Amino acid sequence: MRKSLILLVFVLFALPKIALADNDPWEKAKEILEQIKDPVFPDRDYVITKNGGKPGAKHDNTKVINRLIEKCSKAGGGRVIIPPGEFYTGPITLKSNVNLHLQEGATLMFSNNPSDYTPFVRTRWEGLDVINYRPLIYASDETNIAVTGKGKLDGRADNESWWWMKEKRSMAGKKA
C-alpha cells in the first residue's frame, strides 16, 4: 500500500513536470531568440530629398520612397534616409537589405485615405491572417530589413479615416 501511494504521488506531481520540461515555452523562446541576428547593411545611403522627395502636405512622397527602396535593394542594400521635416506618404514596401532610417526631426505623415492602401495584401489583423488593406510599412518574403532612427511615424488615424473598421468609441471609452 505504501509503495502504491508513493507511486501515485510521483505520477501526480513529478510526471507532469517531466512532460512539460520538453515543451517549456520559455525554452522554445530562447531557442528562437538565439536564431535572430541583427541586420547588417552596406554603407550606402539614398536620401529622399536628393532624389525628388519634398517636405510638406502638398507633396506625396510615396513613389519617391518606394522607388529608392527598390533601387537600394537592387544595388545590394543600404539606407533610405528620411531627413528632418514632415514628409507625406502612402504605404511603404520594404525590400531585402534595406534600412529605412528616419533622422532625428523627421516625420513620415502617412495618408489617412483608405483607398491609398489598396490593392489588398496578405497581412495580420488582431492576430489573424487576413487579406486586408496594406499596412503603413509592409514587407513580404523579404530578409535583412529594418526601420531605424529617432524620427517619427505618424499614421494620422482618427475616427473619420480608420475607426469605421472598429466600433466607434467616445473619448471616455464608451460606445458612441
Image (spheres, grey):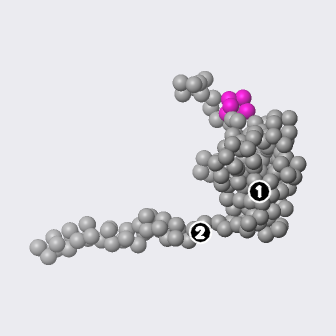
Callout 2 touching callout 1 (CB < 8 Å): no
| Left or right: 81 as drawn, with respect to 166 | right
Residue 17 picture location, percent across and down: 32, 68
Residue type marked 1? Val
> Closer to the camera: disc 2 or disc 1?
1
Residue sitting at 37 percent across and 71 percent down?
A: 21
Q: Is 41 part of what is drawn in magenta?
A: no
Q: Main secondary structure of the magenta part?
A: loop
Residue 126 picture location, percent across and down: 60, 47
Residue sitting at 75 percent across and 36 percent down?
A: 112
Q: Which mark is residue 37?
A: 2
Q: How many marks?
A: 2
Q: Quadrant of the C terminus?
A: top right
Vertical placement of residue 166 versus 14, above or below: above
The span picked out in magenta is 158-163
Q: Which mark is residue 80?
A: 1
Q: Is residue 130 visible?
A: no
Q: Is residue 62 visible?
A: yes
Q: Residues within 10 Å of mark 2 (few under 14, many from 20)?
A: few
Residue 141 picture location, percent across and down: 72, 64
The residue nearer to you, when weighing 134 against 16, is 134
Q: Earlier in the sequence, mark 2 or mark 1?
A: 2
